[in-house]
Amino acid sequence: MSLMFCSICECKLEEDDDFTTVDGRPVCDSCFSENYHYCSNCDTIIHSNETYYNNAGDPFCSSCYEDEDNEDEDEYDEDCPNNPSVTEEEKETIIKLANQWLNDDNPRKFNINIKQGDYCLADLRTKIGLVISPVYVYGLSKRDEYELCVSPDIQPTVTEFLEFNNLPWQVTTGYGSRRIGISYSLRLDHFDEIIKLVKELTDGVLCAA
């Protein structure tokens, strides 16, 4: 080993001495501890005059300190009260929503499916909103023998709705699953009742027209 000296105190560095190379210059262990730090985030060697400290007293280089400072600003809300008032009802709601999120048991919701371009069906989907069990709704061509065409799986619900509301609409059985065809005259003159029928098919709650 060639003869070396500490670049700060100029003490002679023996072969077994502890020292650190800073910017290509040897620095003895004592001078290093007094003048330098390792960044707590990236381990870069930083001079004491260029060291930044967080609230816990950890040393950081300027770049890492700015990143940490920005994260703290993102997490801190100046308008947030230190001790917000929360009612028991609000606590129960928060716990319920948290459990739903943790258990992933909050059911997904969908728009009803419609045949594009048929009269009133776009408005029907807007009025119904998101539902758990969607149906496919389409417009019937003009017919004299029936006004509704429904798939076998939803026909009992449709029949119950019509009987419950004393509606004399003519129904025929179609094909497929969760499909309902609605005549132009019903869409034109009984739009409110149609909304309630589709809501019952999608929500499972008997509605009075």
Image: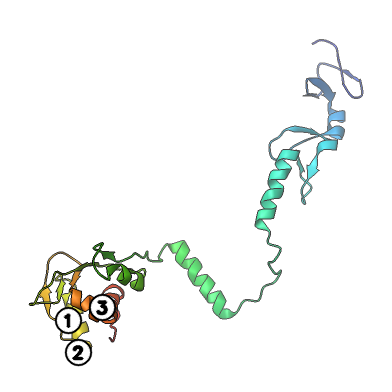
Residue 196: horizontal and vertical position, in percent? 29, 80
Give 186 or 130, whichever is nearer the viewer. 186
Neighbour class for label 3 at 10 Å: few (<14), some, many (≥20)? some
How far is the residue under mark 2 from the one under mark 1?
A: 10 Å
How far is the residue under mark 1 from the one under mark 3?
A: 13 Å
Residue 160: horizontal and vertical position, in percent? 19, 83
Neighbour class for label 1 at 10 Å: few (<14), some, many (≥20)? some
Which element carries disc 3, helix, strand or loop? helix
Identified by mark 1, the residue type is: Thr
Neighbour class for label 2 at 10 Å: few (<14), some, many (≥20)? few
Question: In the rendered image of this protein, does residue 8 appear above or below residue 66?
Answer: above
Asked which quadrant contains residue 173, the reply is: bottom left
Q: From the image, which quarter does the C terminus lie in?
A: bottom left
Identified by mark 2, the residue type is: Asn
Q: On the image, numbered disc 1 is attached to which residue?
A: 159
Which element carries disc 1, helix, strand or loop? helix
**Image point (16%, 72%), residue name:** 150
Image mark for residue 206: none
Q: On the image, numbered disc 2 is attached to which residue?
A: 166
Question: In the rendered image of this protein, does residue 51 appear above or below residue 71?
Answer: above
**Image point (8%, 77%), residue name:** 144
How far is the residue under mark 3 from the one under mark 2?
A: 14 Å
Image mark for residue 194: 3
Instruction: Left or right? Give the position of 168 relative to 202.
Output: left
Is tag 2's residue or tag 1's residue first in the polypeptide sequence? 1
